[in-house]
Image (cartoon, rainbow, N blue to C red):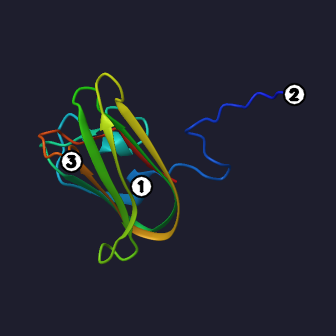
Amino acid sequence: MRKRLIPKVQQDALSPGQAWLNLGEIAEVEISSEETTHPIESALLPGTSSGWRAAQPGDQTIRLRFYHPQSLRRIRLDFVEAQTERTQQYLLRWSPDDGQSYQEIARQQWNFSPEGSTSETEEHHVELPAVTLLELIITPDISGGDAIATLSQWKLA
């Protein structure tokens, strides 16, 4: 019998010629709220690790407004919730015309549980030619509880 080891695929690896975009240089961010100890920069900029946290419960919106239209091929979202059991949903959408119209990229939901699933990473491989605005709407608890939205990391390539 022949056998061959399958090499481990590194989740964060980018293909040659592809690099994570420096969002601090190419976009302005709009947020519905943020906790002062967990600002949005902590989820968007390299070298930061605490992630973003909303200041109050309920739906939260994070918008990236690009200074110039961007071509996007990959979107990575990392969420961590180790304390509250809940079902979270997010809507990711983009606009080619500064928010006058939107096209949905993904709508996802999953369950967080302190005894089980405490983190979720979503990778979206896309072909978006001229993005002027990228919007993430997080519903931290679809049952309407008082959960606080968080985002560990948001990367684009």
Q: Between marks 3 and 1, how big is the CA–CA gap?
A: 34 Å
Give the residue pinned by disc 3: 142
Q: Residue at x 20, y 34 (%)?
A: 37
Q: Quadrant of the N terminus?
A: top right
Report the residue marked by disc 1.
Answer: 25
Question: Is label 2 in a helix, a strand or a loop?
Answer: loop
Which mark, by number, is residue 49? none
Q: Amino acid at mark 2?
A: Arg
Residue furthest out toward the front: 1
- Residue at image point 37% right, 45% down: 44
Q: Which mark is first along the chain, 3 or 2?
A: 2
Q: Nearer the viewer, mark 3 or mark 1?
A: 3
Estimate the x, y position of residue 125 in percent, counting from the top left.
Answer: 53, 56
| Spatial separation of the CA atoms under disc 2 and disc 1 | 51 Å
Q: Judge from the rendering whether residue 146 lies leftward or rightward of residue 96; answer left or right.
A: left
Instruction: Please rate how many residues cluster around mark 2, counting C-alpha atoms within 10 Å: few if below 14, some from 14 to 19, many from 20.
Output: few
Residue depicted at x 26% and y 50%: 138
In the rendered image, which residue does mark 2 sit on? Answer: 2
**Residue depicted at x 71% and y 31%:** 7
Give the label, 2 or 1, closer to the camera: 2
Amino acid carrying mark 3 in the image: Ile
- Of residue 129 and residue 58, the one placed in the foreground of this image is 58
Instruction: Looking at the image, tell me whether mark 3 or mark 1 is earlier in sequence order.
Output: 1
